[in-house]
Image (cartoon, grey):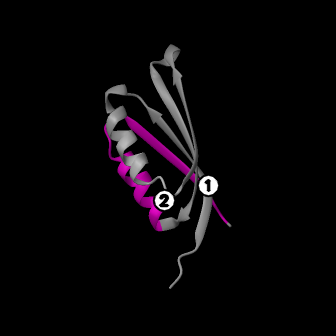
């Protein structure tokens, strides 16, 4: 069975910068589904925002967002469309 691929965006808000190594490790592990990445430190609010463009199956993208969302001080939202 071929899994349907989706294109989408994932927004990650990092409230605890000490989690950066863990976040980067997870993102590196899912490099095959990440098309692009932009990270912006928002110093005035004491947090960072990472946006990802992804292209993968719903299982792959769900696993990525699930792992990120389980990190303390990290919030994740995604929006996907059928390709």
Which span is picked out in magenta?
59-82
**Residue 41 sits inside the magenta stretch:** no
Residue picked out by circle 2: 61
Q: Earlier in the sequence, mark 1 or mark 2?
A: 1
Query: Which disc number belongs to residue 22?
Result: none
Task: Mark 1 and mark 2 in contact? Answer it, CB < 8 Å.
Answer: yes
Rendered view: 37 above or below 33? above
The one of 77 and 4 positioned closer to us in this rendering: 4
Please identify the quadrant where the C terminus is shown.
Answer: bottom right
Q: Residues within 10 Å of mark 1 (few under 14, many from 20)?
A: some
The one of 2 and 47 positioned closer to us in this rendering: 2
Which quadrant of the view contains residue 24? top left
Residue furthest out toward the bottom: 1
**Residue 60 sits inside the magenta stretch:** yes
Residue picked out by circle 1: 8
Looking at the rendered structure, the secondary structure element under dot 2 is: helix
Q: CA distance from mark 1 to mark 2?
A: 9 Å
Residue at the (51%, 66%) spot, across then down: 58
Residue at the (45%, 18%) spot, across then down: 46
């Amino acid at each position: 069975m071929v899994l349907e691929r989706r294109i989408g965006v994932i927004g990650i808000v990092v409230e605890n910068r000490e989690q950066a190594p863990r976040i980067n490790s997870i993102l590196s592990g899912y490099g095959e589904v990440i098309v692009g990445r932009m990270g912006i430190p928002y110093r005035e609010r004491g947090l960072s925002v990472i946006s990802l463009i992804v292209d993968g199956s719903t299982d792959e993208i769900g696993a990525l967002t699930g792992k990120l969302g389980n990190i303390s001080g990290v919030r994740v939202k995604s929006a996907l469309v059928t390709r």
